[in-house]
Amino acid sequence: MRRRRLILLLLTGGVLLSGCWSSSPIEDLNVQVGIALDAADETGMEKEFEQKGGKYPKRNKMTCTYQFIVPEGSSGSTRDGTQSKIYYNMSETGNSIFETIRELSLRTNRNPVGHHLKIIVIGESLARSTNLSELIDFFTRDNDIRLSVLVLVSKGKASEVLSQALPNQIPSLVLKGIYNNRDRSSRIGEPLSLAKLIGPLHGKTSFILQNVIASGKEPKFAGAGVIKGKTGKLIGFLNESEVEGLIWLTGRGKGGVLKIHDPESDKLITYEIKTIGSKIKAKMKGDDISFEVKIESTGRYIEMFVPGGEPLDESRIKEDEKVLEKHVKEMVQKTVAKLQGEFHVDAAEFGRTLHIQHPDVWNKVNENWDETFSHTPITYEVKIDIKDYGASGTTIE
Amino acid sequence: MWNTIMDFFPSWTVLIQGLFILVVPVAITIAVKWLGLKEGQMSRRGIKAAGRKGGGVPSAQKPGEKVQKGTPSSGGNRDNVQTNTGFGKEEEASGEVFTGRFQEDLQQFKDITRDMSDVSVREFYIGPLKIKAALFFLAGLTDKEGMDRDILKPLMYADRPFEGMTIAPDAASLKDILVHQVILVSEIGYTDHLMKSLQKVLFGTAVLMVDGMKEVFVLGTPKGRTRGGEEPVSEALLRGPRIGFNETLSDNTSMLRRHGKTTELAMISFTVGKRVQKELVLAYMKDIANQELVEEVERRIRTIDIDDVQESGFVEQLIEDNYLSPFQQIQNTERPDRVMAALLEGRVAILLDGTPFALIMPVTFSMLLQSPEDYYDRWLPGSLLRVLRFFAAFISLFGPSLYISFLSFHPGLIPTKLVISILSSRQGVPFPTLIEALIMEVSIEILREAGLRLPKPIGPAMGIVGGLIIGQAAVEAGIVSPILVIVVAVTAISSFSMPMYSAGITLRLLRFAVMFSAAMFGLYGVILFFLLLISHLIKLKSFGVPYVGVVVPYRINDWKDFFIRLPLQFMKRRPALLKPKNPIRKG
Amino acid sequence: MDTKPRDQITTGQTMIVMVNYIVGAGILTLPRTTVEAAGTPDVWISVILGGIASMLTGIIMVKLCQRFPGESFFQFIGKIIGKPLGVCLNIAIVVYFLSIASYEVRTVQEVTGFFLLEGTPAWAIDASFMWIALYLCRGGINAVSRLCRLIVPITWTIFLGVCLISLEVFDVNNLRPVLGEGIGPVWKGIMPAEVTFTLGEAMLFLTAFMEKPKKAVKVIIGGTAIATVFYVLAVVLTIGAFSVDGVTTRTWPFLDLIRSFEVDYLIFERFESLLMSIWIMQIFCLFCISFYGAALGLSQTMNRKFHNSLFVLLPLAYIISQLPPNINGLFSLGAMNGNWAIVIFGFVPLPLLIIAYLRRVGS
């Protein structure tokens, strides 16, 4: 009997004493939702800290701005209806991202955790000077941070992007939410999560990263940054219509708008995209590589200023399709021209097409693909199919 | 070379941890063995012998095994057999017998009932010959009206049978006359034991003693307070018979008989209890139930060794397989239809006098989540309800523990938007999640218990109001978070949806265990507990039948009645794991 | 459970045990190990070939076992090659099973310790896991096979469901070109695939328990085929999401696959909790099977009580699991197990079968 009691005692004691090893209650956590990485630029507060002796050996390489959620209950102002900021940002400068996070632990009792990190925004100057794989290494290695975190670049200061939002909105979540509008606009590139970033960075292929800028209270997705695979650094930006061209080229759009305006006749056709598809074919002629791009799209008239009041008959539609096709072709050509001529990188996955279609050739040109690509001739063929004209069957009177 | 090997040699801490890992299960095994040993000393549950060593005694021979020995006279069959086989030598030796001398016997009887004021004696003369007779009965239990009408009156007015007689006939012919011509009672037995007759009297029968006769008549006239077969409170159904067992064994057996005509329904009677004897009936379908199963149940009934079997819960606890298991291995029910359904699947039922709760065995896990309604409704709604119940069982078991493990261990596994709202709602809650959940769970359990004890009209209101008010107040006071109140409420509601009350209790009990496990290891703890639970269930057997046999069927066919209930046409076979004699339901 | 098998399991149960024995910790790392060796996205072909290879070795073992119905390998080996040699081989196999069990428990410790329970001491994670396994194994092969059968519907549904949702990040271009660099890389990938697969050695003792040992070949073919499907799915989906370049950088590629997407149209936004749960259950099964195999082997070789050998092996399993000093050590323990398996179960059974045939032992 005594022995059994002893064992029971030991067991319960052990359970009670040792329990909850890894427990970290949710209310004691500081939930990070966004991180902005910028070239080093210490904030005023940090400078003051340093003056008062808050220093440790470091090289000021980057400034990390962390966005945390402010729990509603503690701000106390939600009840009286006043709109308040439900997030706050903290900045810390250093040369190791992890160290700056832990440095934050000296400034707040609530421990920063990265489970719910959604967005990493990298500022232009930092992205131009540092290999991206160095910047994201911590995020891909950490056990809390998930690989679904989206990565963006910002033309300007990234921390500004994270400090702009309408009241009661969290900038990071807004940015993530904007990606849901890809069926509304064809000027948003594919969301690039860490998971999707690892491959190209490791494989040294070039790609584009969504660019986001901020002004006033709002952020805006504006074009994209081009990352050169060899160096992993940002080499320039595509503007909105060039991104649009790229999306038409790769056929990875989910919807959006195509508008042409003819200033002479003051004619405006707005075409709502329903589907976009593209096929790229690599052609070999001896050692010469060339690509043939076929783009197809279906959609409808959604807004047109074409005086006349005529019914939208077949010939009219055919005519407009021609115009639209020409426009798309020009747009795509402009984009590719910029990639080939200005940046000398293949951010449009032509290389992968070649790899899939002609693996043996790819092995030969793989090493110097970006250069080879710059001189590769590409032909385009665009086919647009206007399926219907909405609820109104005529041009306007 | 040597160094590399030494590098791999485990450090002392690892060895000590390994020792610890060994010691704990060994200790538990020893403890359990020791418990088993103790139990062996205390009771006879484990005795394999089939003899009548135990207190439970079969009151009838197995049907068709032997011709009954007693003297089967008109109607007195049952009591007679009991007299012959039921009571061992022990009683015969000690028991005093009636001498046949009236005054002596009367005095003897009065002596032993001196401290039983409710035993009444009525002396009278039989017929014109004025044969002295006495009737013993119990004031409250005997059907007095019937006794006056069918016993006293015919005896006292018995002119015709004694026509032409001047002196009292000898005992044998007197008995013959009385039985065949005078007494208007169908149930007649005889005994010459004083104690035995007293027992009968105390149970409500009238005992007639006649001058000159060594035997007394045991006349079946009991009329206990019985209750009609009302709808069972604990197992209410929307659809299905509105009848439940009551406290009288004969009523209950008749309810089973009345379910439908069958000649295969066997009911074997046993007497259980050392000091207070009660009748217990073992029911099964002769052509379906597995013979081994029936024998095993009979054997276990015989090992019952207790003063008084107060309720069928006593039987349940005394004959179940594993008393350390939190799961009930015998199902109790108040519904005759449920019992019949089980019998037809090849199971065995036990009915005990004095309780409306019948026992069904063996039990399999899925039965705990089944309700007769599943079968009465059409198969689609029936299946829906069943799936719903499984879901409810899951929530009721794991709800709070998942709350604990997600909130205090893995905030990363909760959707972000939910995290934001939980984060806000938990601000200012002073307790860790385990304590918080315990506070709410315990108070809900207390409320539920209190709701049961409270007078009927207040009870339910108290439960709801109490729950609402306490929950609301606790949130307002900042002791618990609103999310937890939702979790606790959903859990409580889920546990109410268990069709078996006692299964619900098991889940409630286990819920606390999972909560602790979750508080220690988070989600990992919950998974481990789940694995432990199913490991236990897998090893658990109820009367030799695997407890989760249906979940892990021997034959895939048994799945048809588990998560979903297939249309009745498809349920052609009885559950195979019961090894019924006749596996096909029809055709 | 004495040294003599009394429990019996059906063909279906054996097959499920077999699948559970094959699909184990390797599923998390297989995409990386194979891609590292092959360097092309064609490794799924290697995985299929590996499956077929392990099927073949499994069939040889089954054929061997079928010559001695009702007896496990540990019991009849002595009849073929004599007692002393047999005991040596038995000990080697027991150590092998034990080390498989240890490898699994260590993987659980590493993965839960990293992703779920940072900060909980390793022994606590291992101890609770092993105690429950011990409790289950005391129920004999029937309990183990029932557990497998019980959790299989749960784990398979969740696994397939999660795989389906992961199509969100799947890009078929990552798997192309098929055989772009010829068949060469595929061969290189077979070895790591084979190491992960194990060779169906559980049949050495499972056959003895089968109700119908004649169907053991079916079991090994069916079991390995199902397991191959799981592995191929894992490899294809992971490469499809990360591309060949990305997979090689991930320590636990398959787990990272589940961590790399979020859906907002379901209650769950993130699925690694579900995957971790079923994965732990799956590993638990595997641990029980190999632990049971080790204990059975020990008890039958030494003629000791089965329960006692369970107790003896428990701390040993823990100690072996703690031998690898770090995660690379763990991976090399896994690779070592696989290599040993190929030596013991790939090359030994065939000569044994021939010897048994020549010496005319067994039916």
Image (tube, coloured by chain):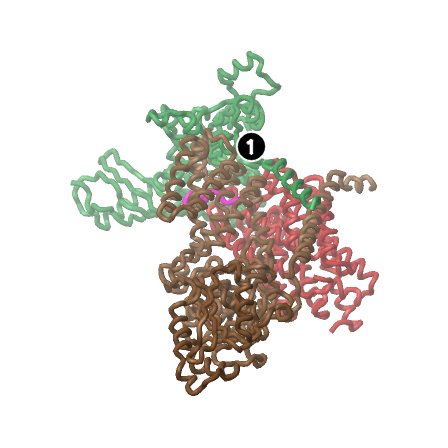
Chain colours: A green, B brown, C red
Q: What element carries label 1?
A: loop
- Quadrant in the picture for residue B144: bottom left
Q: Relative to residue B542, is residue A155 depicted above or below?
A: above
Residue B17 on image: x %, y %: 71, 41
Q: Is residue B43 visible?
A: yes
x, y percent for residue C127: 66, 45
Disc 1 marks a residue whose amino acid type is Thr
For residue C134, above or below residue B229: above
Segment tinted magenta in the rendering: C263-273
**View extreme (front): residue:** B166
| Residue bearing mark 1 | A231
Q: Which of the pair B484/C227 is nearer the observer?
A: B484
Furthest residue toward top:
A51
Marked residue chain, label 1: A
**Above or below, C319 relative to B54:** above
Q: Front-most of A347 and C47?
A: C47
